[in-house]
Amino acid sequence: METISESDKDFVCDIQAPCFQLLSPEEIKLIRASKTQVLFRKGENLTKQGTFPSYVMFVMNGIVKQYVEGGGTHNYNLHIMIAGDFIGLSSVFTKETFAYSTIALVDTRVFLIGKEAITKVLQQNGSFAFNIFRRYSEYNVGLYTAINNLMYKQMNGHLADALLYLSSDEFKSLDIFIHLSRKDIADFAGLSTESTVKLLKSFEKDGFIKLEEKNIIVIDKTSLEDISQIG
C-alpha cells in the first residue's frame, strides 16, 4: 500500500466519478478534506475479514476481488469490484468488523474516505444516498442468488454461473480471466480446483468455451445459460 501525495504524478486532483457529481460544493469539500489517496499493488489486501474499518474505500481504477475466507485454503469469491465501486459501506451503518476480505488483482488506486464524512453526506443528500443504496441492494441480490445456486445446483450449474458472471458486459473491457487463476474461478463456483479444471475442459470439448492459457473465451453463452437454468 502506498499513499499518494499531491506531488506524485499518479495523484488525481479531483473527484470525477458520476456518483460524486450529485454532491453540493460543500459536500464535495467535506469528502475531499477527509479522503486519502492510496495505491494498492497487485496482490495486496485492501481489507481483511475480521478487522475493524475506520473508513470507506472508493475504487478509482483497478480490479479488486471480494471474498469470504473459509477454513484452511478454501475461500468463496463474492464479487469483482471495479472503478466506481465502494468497499466497506456496511461499516457506515454498523460497528461490526469486515465480513469479507478484498485483494487487488492489478495495481488499484482508491480513495479512503472517513466514515464520519460519508455518513454525513448520506444523511443530508437523498439523491447520493439513493444511488448508494441501490448499488448496495444489487450486491445483496447477487449474494442471495449465489447462496441459492450453491444450495440447489450441481457442479455444471455452479461453473456455468461463474463463467456467465465473469464474462458479463460489466467486465467485458477488462479481460478479467487473465487476472484469475483456476483456483479463483473454482472459488467463484464453490468447487474444488480439480473439479473446475475438468469441467472447463469438458465445456471446451462441448464447444461452450475456448481455453487460451489463462484466458477463457465464452463462445456459446446460450448453452451456458441453459446449463445454469437446469442447474
Image (cartoon, helix red, strand yellow):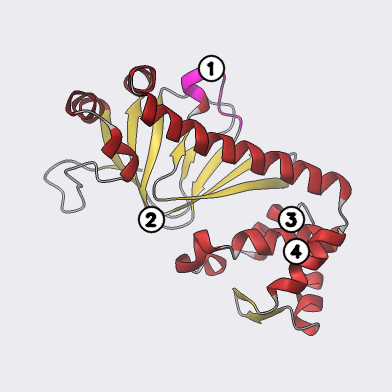
Horizontal arrangement in the rendering, residue 92 relative to residue 114 (left or right): right
Which dot marks residue 160? 4
- Stretch in magenta: 91-99
| Residue 138 seen in render | yes
Residue that numbered label 3 is attached to: 189
Please name which of the two marks, 2 or 4, marks the residue nearer to the observer.
4
Crowding at label 3, few (<14), some or many (≥20) Cα neighbours within 10 Å? many
**In screen coordinates, is 146 left or right of 216?**
right
* For residue 80, side relative to residue 122 (left or right): right
Pick the residue in front: 193 or 131.
131
Mark 1 residue element? loop
Name the residue located 80 percent from the left edge and 49 percent from the top edge. 149
Q: Residue at x 61, y 43 (%)?
A: 67
Nearest to N terminus: mark 1 or mark 3: 1
Measured Cα–Cα span from mark 3 to mark 2: 25 Å
Q: CA distance from mark 3 to mark 4?
A: 8 Å
Mark number displayed over residue 230: none
Q: Quadrant of residue 189?
A: bottom right
Magenta stretch secondary structure, dominant: loop
Contact check, label 1 and label 4, Cβ < 8 Å: no
Identify which amino acid the numbered label 3 is placed on. Ala
Earlier in the chain: of badge 2 and badge 4, it is: 2
Q: Position of residue 176 (x, y in %)?
A: 53, 65
Q: Is residue 32 above or below residue 156?
A: above
Alpha carbon separation for disc pair 1 and 2: 29 Å
In the rendered image, residue 184, in percent from the top left (x then y), is placed at 64, 57
Type of amino acid under label 1: Thr
Q: Which residue is mark 2?
A: 107
> Which of the two discs, 3 and 2, sits closer to the camera?
3
